[in-house]
């Protein structure tokens, strides 16, 4: 498994929904791959918003959801708000210690 | 509240060494694996290294294996990253992150980062 591919940018208007894809998340037979997603506002450290494919840490809005199909994981943000404008990164983990990040997607709220 | 405070970054010449530290508070430190993740000037995130809660099991990305060493002092609640033979491509903001009790499966909390610049 190597680097993950994300679109460089996506945009949407307030109230709309957007989806960010993350391709290359491959699970080999007998192993498992855990996907997490991170939000990073300009000048700040990344923040975990989704883990184990679809779980949200305490305090993260239910407007954030995720799914996985085949080798593609997806992050969906519904009801876009201005505060959602940030960079988003996917991350995959496979035993025993293989960790890869996607290249990041810049979300612009129009 | 989890707090992670990195220190030790700076400007270093190619081939040089640097040691990063991360002081942790707000959680049972010895229970959790700790990780280092770096962000390049191009804004790409790259996992660098992790260490189990006990400190017995280190993990490394291929790009740093043999050059970087991770360690931790649970009595001081601090994790370290010793970096040797630094290259220009190691230039990045280095974040300390709290992982899970099992390993570097995700990064729950992050420090503010410390900048490492490798240049002559």
Image (cartoon, rainbow, N blue to C red):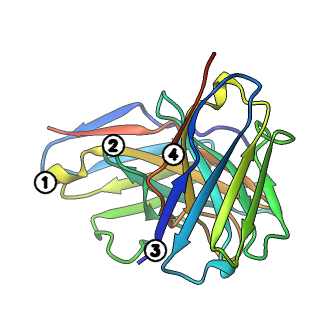
Helix, strand or loop under label 1:
loop
Name the disc covering residue A43, or none. 2
Mark earlier in primary sequence (3, 4): 3
Q: Are marks 3 and 1 on the same chain?
A: no
Q: Is residue A52 left or right of residue A78?
A: right
Q: Quadrant of residue B21?
A: bottom right
4 and 2 marks in contact (CB < 8 Å)? no
Name the disc covering residue A15, or none. 1
Q: Would you name the residue on which mark 4 appears?
A: B114
3 and 1 marks in contact (CB < 8 Å)? no
Helix, strand or loop under label 4:
strand
Helix, strand or loop under label 3:
loop
Q: Mark 3 belongs to which subunit?
A: B
> Measuring 40% from the left and 46% from the top, which residue is drawn there?
A88
Residue that protrudes farthest toward the top in the picture: B120
Q: Mark 4 belongs to which subunit?
A: B
Q: Nearer the viewer, mark 2 or mark 1?
A: 2
Name the disc covering residue B2, or none. 3
Q: From the viewer's perspective, is residue B47 above or below residue A94?
A: above
Helix, strand or loop under label 2:
loop
Q: Quadrant of the C terminus of chain A?
A: top left
């Amino acid at each position: 498994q190597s680097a993950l591919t994300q679109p460089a940018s996506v945009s949407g208007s307030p109230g709309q929904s957007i989806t960010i894809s993350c391709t290359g998340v491959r699970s080999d037979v007998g192993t498992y791959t855990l996907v997490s997603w991170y939000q990073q506002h300009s000048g700040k450290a990344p923040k975990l918003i989704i883990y184990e494919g679809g779980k949200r840490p305490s305090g993260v809005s239910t407007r954030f959801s995720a799914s996985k199909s085949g080798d593609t994981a997806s992050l969906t943000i519904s009801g876009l708000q201005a505060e959602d404008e940030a960079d988003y990164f996917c991350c995959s983990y496979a035993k025993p210690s293989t960790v890869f990040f996607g290249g990041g997607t810049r979300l612009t709220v129009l | 509240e989890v707090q992670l405070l990195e220190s030790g970054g700076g400007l270093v010449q190619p081939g040089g060494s640097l040691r990063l530290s991360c002081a942790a508070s707000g959680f049972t430190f010895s229970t959790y694996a700790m990780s280092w993740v770096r962000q390049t000037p191009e804004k790409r995130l790259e996992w660098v290294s992790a260490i189990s809660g006990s400190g017995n099991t280190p993990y490394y990305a291929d790009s740093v294996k043999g050059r970087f060493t991770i360690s931790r002092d649970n009595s001081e609640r601090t994790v370290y990253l010793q970096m040797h033979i630094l290259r220009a491509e190691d230039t990045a903001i280095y974040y300390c992150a709290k992982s899970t009790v099992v390993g570097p499966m995700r990064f729950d909390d992050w420090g503010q980062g410390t900048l490492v610049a490798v240049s002559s």
